[in-house]
Amino acid sequence: MTVASARCALLFFAPLVVCAPAAAQTATHAPAPAPAGATAAWTARMKGDIRWQQVTPAGALLVSTDAALAGVDIETGQITWEKAELGGLPVDSVRIVEGSLLMEAARPNLLVIFDPVTGAVVFDSRRLSLAQVVTKRVLPQSGTLLLHGRRAQGPPVVALYDLATGEQRWANETLFEQTERKKKGLGGLMQNLVRAASEATALEVLQAGPDMIVVHTLSGLRAMDAKTGAVRWTATLPTARSGSLPHHVQLYPSLAKSDRIYVSFDERLMAYRLADGQALWAQPATVDGRVRDIVQHPAGIIMLPEGAPEGEGTSNRRVVINGVVQTGLNVARYDDGTTIAQKPLHMRGNVTDALIVGDAAVLTTDAESKTFVNVLDVGTATLRLKKDVKIKGQLAYAELTPAGLLYVSRPDAGTDAEVNVVDLGSGDLRFKDAIQGDHRAYLYNAVEGRTLYAFANKDHKLYAVDRDAGTFKALSGEIKLQGGEDVTSLEVRPAGIVLISSQNLVVVGRDGQVKQQVYYPAPQLPGLLRALHTLNAVRAGLYGAAASAYGDAFAQASRNATDTMAKRITGQMATAYTQGGAQLTGYSRQSAALATKRFKASLAVPSSVFMLTKAPEGNGNVLLQIDKESAQARSRVDLGKEREPVYAVDDVAGMLFLRTVPGTLVGYRL
């Protein structure tokens, strides 16, 4: 069964400046058929000159002019809304609200959060006279946006807003008030300092079902009624020393038991009952070090330890050997919080991840910026390997196969990536001459049947790894990309293995022979490629919003799933959307419907890529849509002779948006 770190397999276009002939070059040097011109689907005339534009994950096109910020329907070109107060903002001031379909626009003393499809303002910092927004969190399960901020005068406030209408559901100005008995003297001074620090610290927020929101302030846990904002219960975390504050507090939903949540702090983990906030375990479960994260495996809760920062000591012993902090991992039982191992398992460094593989988990440990791996049998809390195995780079992909632990690493500072197999009997690496990557680029890989394909930018060869036998071979000879580029994406398609970079595309047969290779030199102005970079952000934002619609439990499940991020999304979430007919709950009807349609469309891996190159006819630049199977250009759009044309691309809808003359926007269907 395969596992991978939380990464999204999205196409990334790297900005590169190269000097080369403008014509496309192919491996066979056969002339490519001239691509058809893209069809102009609509024309929109804006108020004022167009400064910039961007596609949002929700599917609306934002267009900025000196006069206003406007929303444009990408299908029809209709201007659906305009906001004069947001006109003239720089592009970096308008961005996605993390994990949502909403956008935020910021300027000095103003933060506006809005629905890009309807234009409805969900939050305006002027409503509450906020001088600083400390916490913002979208909670689609209850259809709300939670804000916490400080005022120039008066108490801090926590407020909840309806995602669809922007209506304020409630505001709470007492959340940070002291719940324990007020003390005098030094104790009272400390209470006041804690309250002041808490007001300025971002809240830990957990949506615990549609009716309850649990937050952590420095004063403790608070469970709030999602409808009224009333505090249902409070709880104080049991620290090792009386009067000390807990550090590194994190809240987790329970995946298997709906009556509770889990809270980690310092070296401890505790379960709390949602109904009344009572601790469900007699004592917290502990590790050596502090809890960095947890992974909820069917056999128990794996607590991943890390060394606490200097000056933030925990109650247990921290040992440093040769500059490396020694930590201790353990597994807690769900019922009572007791740990399966009598003593924490000795780990050399910080345990950064536990990737579930059936009854086991692949552990990744960081020690002095070196990466080690081991395999944990969760039910017995024992390690399969007597000694952690050092690997090059950082773990990016791993799976347990009949041959052992097959892994692919990604490079870090000064260290190349590699592909290798760990023999679980001896702990040795099977490949003495491992497939080596390059410290500048990833070892891009994909699985088909029993074969894992990987391209090494170091020697420019495509490799095939037999996952069952634990052997590999170079499938191709050297494949050099023109313009000095590195491969930035690898896909397995019916025509073969497709290698992609910013300006190159190569189709390699399963026999290792190059079938097609094209190169379109990049323009000499890297700013021209900026619009292509946003393709990554749009897809990531769409996936993030879709995941958040299922709440924190889904996010936790995704983190513990057993395959790459792309497969997790296209598998679990696609099933939820198509079989359950789920919508992005909480958002406006228009936004939810459009985003759901776009999400389903995004599940299909694009069959083409976009490349920007100089027009072969003379001055100016063109955007080409290149078919991944044939490596031929399907269509083209002339971007004109401007040094910095204003355009945006949406590969989900297959559209390009171009400012043709000042104030005029044309949408092309590709």
Image: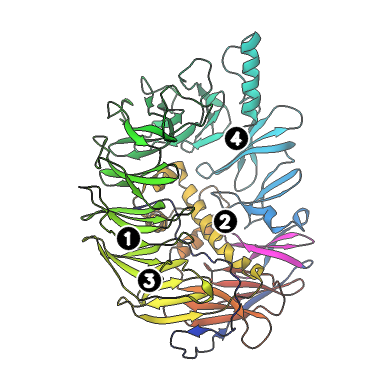
Q: Is residue 348 left or right of residue 81?
A: left
**489 is higher (above) or lower (below) than 420:** below
Residue under label 3? 461
Which of the two residues, 572 or 327, is positioned nearer the viewer here? 327
Q: Amino acid at mark 2?
A: Ser
Q: Amino acid at mark 1?
A: Ala
Q: Amino acid at mark 3?
A: Lys
**Residue depth check, mark 1 versus mark 2: number of the one nearer the observer:** 1
Question: Residue 459 got which mark?
Answer: none
**Residue depth check, mark 4 versus mark 2: number of the one nearer the observer:** 4
SS at mark 2?
helix
Colour scheme in the image?
A: rainbow
Snapshot quadrant of residue 135 = top right
Residue under label 2? 591
Answer few, some or many: residues within 10 Å of disc 2's Cα (few below 14, many 20 plus, some between 14 and 19).
many
Of the two numbered discs 1 and 2 on the same chain, state the one appearing first in sequence. Answer: 1
> Is there a contact, CB below 8 Å, between mark 3 and mark 4?
no
Measure the alpha-carbon separation of dots 1 and 2: 49 Å
Snapshot quadrant of residue 180 = top right
Of the two numbered discs 3 and 2 on the same chain, state the one appearing first in sequence. Answer: 3
Question: Residue 202 got which mark?
Answer: 4
Q: Is residue 2 visible?
A: no
Specify start and end residues of the magenta stretch as a single range. 50-76
Snapshot quadrant of residue 193 = top right
Q: Quadrant of the C terminus?
A: bottom right
Measure the alpha-carbon separation of dots 1 and 3: 13 Å
Secondary structure character of the magenta stretch overall:
strand
Measure the alpha-carbon separation of dots 4 and 1: 45 Å
**560 is higher (above) or lower (below) than 18:** above
Residue under label 1? 434
Of the two numbered discs 1 and 3 on the same chain, state the one appearing first in sequence. Answer: 1
SS at mark 1?
loop
